[in-house]
Amino acid sequence: MSGYFSPFNSSHEEKAFQAVTKATGLPVVLGHELASKLNSVERATTATLNASLLSALQNFINAMAQSLEERGVTAPLMVVRGDGALINSDLAKNRPVETVHSGPAASAIGGRFLSQTDRAVVVDIGGTTTDIALLDQGQVTIREEGTTVGRYNTAVRAAHIHSLGLGGDSRIALNIEDQLVIGPERVTPISYLAHAYPAVAQDLKKLSLHRQKPFSMENLEYWYLLRKPAHTFLNSRTQDVLNLLENGPMAIPDILDKLDLFHPVQFGGNALLREEVIGRSGLTPTDLLHVTGEFAPWNVEAAQATASLTAHLYHEDLNTFIETVKDHISERISAEIISFITGKTLERAPHYIDPDDLGLWLFEENLYQKNPYLGSTINLKIPIIGIGAPAEILLPRVAELLHTELILPPYYQVANAVGAVAGSVISNQEAWVMEQTKTMRHVGYIVQAGKDRKRFSLLQEALDYAKEITGQKAMAEAREIGVVDPHVTYEQLIRVQIKTVG
């Protein structure tokens, strides 16, 4: 439930809450308890998203608490909030929307703690995405205007995170113009699939030995069964595919050949992938690291065969192709860091640069150094803290392109987990001090702090009260969470509104 101006007067929301609770007995989320922002649409969106996440996070926290209890762990269970702060699990159960971006925020906090660096760009390379955050004065920077969840703007105060669909498990493919494309789709590394299903490695080895036979990227990608669906599909072709995959992974052309079809759309392939009934496996950056020996826990032969065949399609030898992919990833991350720091979005890829667009030319020249007479250099004035297992391999080139230092702190591979422990408990409390007028005449000031509302004649009295009540609320919440000696800081934001008459 979320009403107009409820941060200033929540009585109508509370009356509705009492009525609905009495009638249904179901949990009710109130907009004014989640956000004090005066934007009814974003506040309502925040309340709706929070309600939709309640059961999922409550089940997760309950399961985690039970697991800790079984292991004899008696420490309080804390949850990372979206701004990197810690809150107790009981509060998190009722405010799951506040945990949006908690993972990348924890990585940033962990990177700061392990590196003891207060100003830096934190780059966390995971399996699916690369997350970029900015540390300033030891804290991850915050989106005060509210973060986004999918395509929805919310009133949630969370870390300012820039995510791109590029990671260790990103799909490496060639488009119809034979251009290299990495991500944003995530696939299972072919080295892992071949490790789990040795027949896949044998198929790829045969294909590699008979390279003169025509093949395409589709021959190098496999579908495999993740789970048996709970319901029976009406489409008999779909059921036929599932029956085939029960015997093990198959390359897409082999599936089509068995069913005498021309395209996966004929049996609803995309729907099966979307519902995670089947999975897709193909070449990834992780597989290339198997080829180079930099990271090789699974089937190296399958990775080498797939990479070699892809390089052949790209008209490069294997070693050159691997370096091309690494450069592509490093240049993309470098470009995204520049975009994130400047707050500017590149609407066109560098290879589409307008000859008359000097800004984009300078940007491209910084990355690719193509002009024999002119050069452009963009210097990142703060270091990069690398997080995640691939950071050691992929980020040195990024630091080189941006002319800065790369810091790989101890345990950088698991900095996300460290951040969950090293974060601070922070309670943010707000109070509004507003002028009260009557028929365009000043009559005093109103202080609104949650449900508390008080009037004052003098501005200084109102400001002093706002400081006092927010401090009391912050201290009380911190002590409730378990903080022994909380420290209170204050920030005052002044907004001036000019009115004209006539």
Image (cartoon, helix red, strand yellow):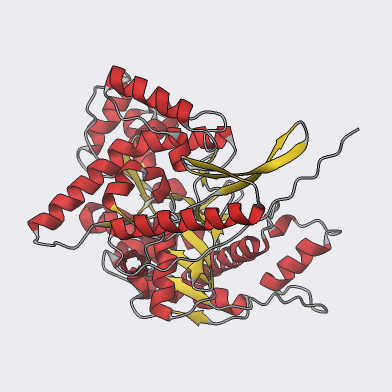
Please tell me which residue is depicted at 41% across the width and 29% down the height of the picture. Answer: 14
Q: Does residue 97 appear to the left or right of 337 in the view shown?
A: left
Residue 481 visible in the picture: yes
x, y percent for residue 318: 47, 69
Q: How many marks?
A: 0
Q: Quadrant of the C terminus?
A: top right
Quadrant showing the N terminus: top left
Measuring from the top left, give residue 413's x and y in whole percent: 35, 71
Left or right side of 206 for 394: right
Q: Looking at this view, is 21 or 201 the one in front?
A: 21
Q: Visible in this render: residue 277?
A: no
- The residue sitting at 44% across, 61% down in the picture is 105
Which residue is at the far right? Answer: 502
Residue under the point 43% across and 59% down: 104
Which residue is farthest front? 457
277 or 124, which lies in front?
124
| Residue nearest the observer in this picture, 368 or 262 | 368
State the image coordinates of residue 340 (x, y, percent, origin top left): 61, 61
Q: Determine which quarter of the picture holds residue 243.
A: top left
Q: Residue at x 48, y 72 (%)?
A: 394
Q: In the image, residue 147 lies at what x, y percent?
A: 53, 48
Above or below residue 144? Residue 395 is below
Quarter where residue 442 is shown: top right
Q: In the displayed structure, does residue 73 sit left or right of residue 193? A: left
Kindly indicate the quadrant of the structure image that contains residue 331: bottom right
Nearer to me, 453 or 197: 453
